[in-house]
Amino acid sequence: MAIITGTGTFTTDSTSIINITGLSQAMIGTVKSGHWIKVNNETTIYDIVLDASLETTLKLKQPYGEATGAKTFELYTSFLSYDIPLLDPNMTGSFYVLNEIFRKLINQLIAAGAPDEHSFIMTRQWVGEPIDLAEWGYFKFNSNVQLDKIRLYTDNGNIDGSLILDFSINDVDQALALNLTTGNAVAESAALTTLCNSDDYIKLKWNNVVLPAGNNYFVDIIYHSTSSYLMRYDFNKTVLGVISAGQEIGKYFKFPVKSKVFAVTITMDDFTGEGGDTVLELYLDNVALTTPVIITIPEGTQNHYEEITQTDYETTEYCSVKVNSTATIPPQNIHILLHSYRIE
C-alpha cells in the first residue's frame, strides 16, 4: 500500500494528467491500472487506466470533470485482486474514499453470492382438500434464517368452510393459528420474528378444518437470511397424482445462477406408496450423471431429507429428477425440493 502525493496539470474532459512534479514516492513500479487518484478538495475518485511508465504523466479511465489547472492529488494503491485500496492515516479525502470502498465491497459480495436481497419466499403446496390434523410441507433450511410472514391462499375462490394453519419447528408448535375464515381465499399472518437455525426442520399443520374448506392450497413463507452465505431452493417441483417409473420431473428446469446441488427434500401429502422403495435419480441435461446420484425413499416415508453427491449446474444446463422405480402401489402428490448454493 502506498499513498503518493504530488502536483499535476488536469484538463477538463481529458484523460491525461501531465507535468507531474513533487512526488512523495516514485510511481513507476508502484502505480498500476486500477489504482485510484483523488484531487485535493474534490469529491470524485478517478481510476488509473494504465500502469505508470513515466514519472511525469498518468492516464485516467474517466475524463476529468472539473476546471483545468495545476492541482495537488493523492494516489491510492489497492489490493489488485479486489480493486479496493487499503486505508492509511494520511488520507485527506477519507470520506469519499470510504464511500467508494463500500461500493466496491458490495459489488464483490454480490458477485461472490452473498445475500443482496432482504426477503425470499419458500412456497409449499397442498393438493386436494385439507385434512384436519394433517402435518405436511416438511423442509429444512440449510442456513440460519428469520421467518418474517406466512401467507395462506387458494386459487379456487372463497371457501364455504374454514380452517387454521399452524407450523412447528423441530416438532415444537409455534402457535401461529393463521385462520382462514368463511368467504375468504387468503389469510396473512402478522409480522413474525421467528428464528430458524441451519438444519431445523419445519412442518405445516391443518387444524380445526370445517368442510367444505376449499382445495389446492399454497403457503408462502417469507423469510430473510441471517447467515453470511445464501442457500438457494430454486428447484421446487410438485407432481400431481401418481408418479410412474421413467417419469422425468423438472425436465427443462435451469438454475438462474451457476449452482451446486447438495441435498434434496421429498415430501408426500398423503399416500406414500406400498410394496417397496421409490428410487429417484438426479439428471443433468436429461441424462444420468457419469457417477449416478441416486435418491432412495424408503417405503412408508412421508418426509425424506438426504444430502447427496454435490453436483454443479451451469445456467445453460437442464436439471431434472428421474423416477427410476416406484413402490408396487406408487406414491402420489410428491414434492421435490433441491437444496443448492451459488458457485460463480
Image (cartoon, rainbow, N blue to C red):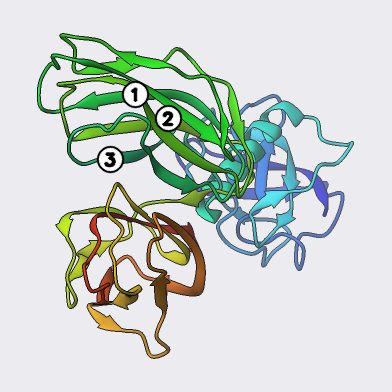
Residue type, mark 3 in image: Gln
Q: Residues within 10 Å of mark 3 (few under 14, many from 20)?
A: many
Q: Position of residue 40 (x, y in %)?
A: 72, 30
Residue found 38% across the figure and 31% down from its top = 133
Q: Residues within 10 Å of mark 1 (few under 14, many from 20)?
A: some
Where does label 3 land, which residue? 125
Q: Quadrant of the N terminus?
A: bottom right
Q: Is residue 196 left or right of residue 339?
A: right
| Quarter of the view holding residue 91 | top right
Q: Position of residue 4 (x, y in %)?
A: 80, 48
Residue found 80% across the figure and 30% down from its top = 92
| Earlier-in-chain disc, 3 versus 2 | 3
| Earlier-in-chain disc, 3 versus 1 | 3
Element carrying mark 3? strand
Where does label 2 land, which residue? 222
Q: Which mark is residue 151?
A: 1
- Residue 320 visible: yes
Q: Position of residue 281 (x, y in %)?
A: 33, 76
Marks 2 and 1: CB-CB under 8 Å? yes
- Residue 118 visible: no
Q: Is residue 219 left or right of residue 153?
A: right
Q: Is residue 123 left or right of residue 192?
A: left
Q: CA distance from mark 3 to mark 2?
A: 15 Å
Q: CA distance from mark 3 to mark 1?
A: 12 Å
